[in-house]
């Protein structure tokens, strides 16, 4: 099987661009090995805001001429850029797998991130499950970080056997998710770490509370919270407040 690989980079955000290109090459290699395919050629698209995609057009034309499959290395946004959502039906198209970003995965914070601690949702407009990052937009590291989450909803209830109503039956209480806790030793300045996953199709029925405790650069314990209660999210960044 022959494929033509299509990569994306973002020259005006070189740090993000370099990491993204490395991840894309690894994802393409994973796909190639799984499908016993070979890369015939590759195209690299330098993205800027409000641009056309000449490399994509050339890659598609190459696929038409050679009968190869277009292998798209990444659809996620790069840095502060936009998500790539191609609609291509004129040629065969395949997508390389997304990188595994489990809790604890650390990356650079976006260059446009607020200069404070926030929750960061790279794919905030999506209705698919997405990673939740703790984004340190400050110029100082934080340490001994604990993240606690719980969801609560009044749309669904569960019996509370410890409290009876006026008929003697167990009363109903709002349904809550199982509380979770996760720890990170250190998060450097201008870095973001995956702390959870957010599923808009399920979690939007809940008010989800995030509580972040940590030591600041003065060795003082700080506690910040944020609440999510709607989907799609209003912004990529959700403020953490005292």
Image (cartoon, rainbow, N blue to C red):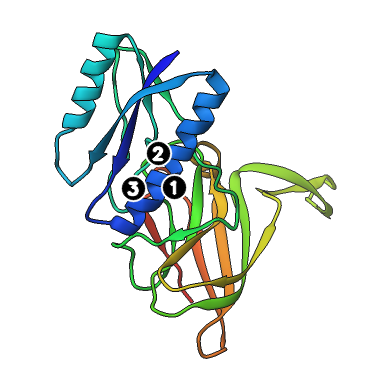
| Of labels 1 and 2, the one closer to you | 2
Image quarter where the N terminus lies is top left
Please indicate whether residue 203 sits to the left or right of residue 83 in the image: right
Q: Nearer the viewer, residue 74 or 136?
A: 74
The residues bearing labels 2 and 3 have C-alpha atoms spaced at a distance of 15 Å
Q: Please indicate whether residue 132 sits to the left or right of residue 125 in the image.
A: right
**Residue that mark 2 sits on:** 126
Q: Position of residue 242 (x, y in %)?
A: 49, 77
The Cα–Cα distance between marks 3 and 1, rounded to whole angstroms, is 25 Å
Q: Earlier in the sequence, mark 2 or mark 3?
A: 3
Q: Give SS at disc 2.
A: loop
Look at the numbered disc 3 and give the secondary structure of its residue. loop
Q: Is residue 90 at all visible to an observer of this figure?
A: no
Q: Is residue 110 visible?
A: yes
- Of badges 3 and 1, the one in the foreground is 3
Asked if labels 3 and 2 touch by Cβ distance under 8 angstroms, the answer is no
The local secondary structure at tag 1 comes to loop
- The residue carrying mark 3 is 78
């Amino acid at each position: 099987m022959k494929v033509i690989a299509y990569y994306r980079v973002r020259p005006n955000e070189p740090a993000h661009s370099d990491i993204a290109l490395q991840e894309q090459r690894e994802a393409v290699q994973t796909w190639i090995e799984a499908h016993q395919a070979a890369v015939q050629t590759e195209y690299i698209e330098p993205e800027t805001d409000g641009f056309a995609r000449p490399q994509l057009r050339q890659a598609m034309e190459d696929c038409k001429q050679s009968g190869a499959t277009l292998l798209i290395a990444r659809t996620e946004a790069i840095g502060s850029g936009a998500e790539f959502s191609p609609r291509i039906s004129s040629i065969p198209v395949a997508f390389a797998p997304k990188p595994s970003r489990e809790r604890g995965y650390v990356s650079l914070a976006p260059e446009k991130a607020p200069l404070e601690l926030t929750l960061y949702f790279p794919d905030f407009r999506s209705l698919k499950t997405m990673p939740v990052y703790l984004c340190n937009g400050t110029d100082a590291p934080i340490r001994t970080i604990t993240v606690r989450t719980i969801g609560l909803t009044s749309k669904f209830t569960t019996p509370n056997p410890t409290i009876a109503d006026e008929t003697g039956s167990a009363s109903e209480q709002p349904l809550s998710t199982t509380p979770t806790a996760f720890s990170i030793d250190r998060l450097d300045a201008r870095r973001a770490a995956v702390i959870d996953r957010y599923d808009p199709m399920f979690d939007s029925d809940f008010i989800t509370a995030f509580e972040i405790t940590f030591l600041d650069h003065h060795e003082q314990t700080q506690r910040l919270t944020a609440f999510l209660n709607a989907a799609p999210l209003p912004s990529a960044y959700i403020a953490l407040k005292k």
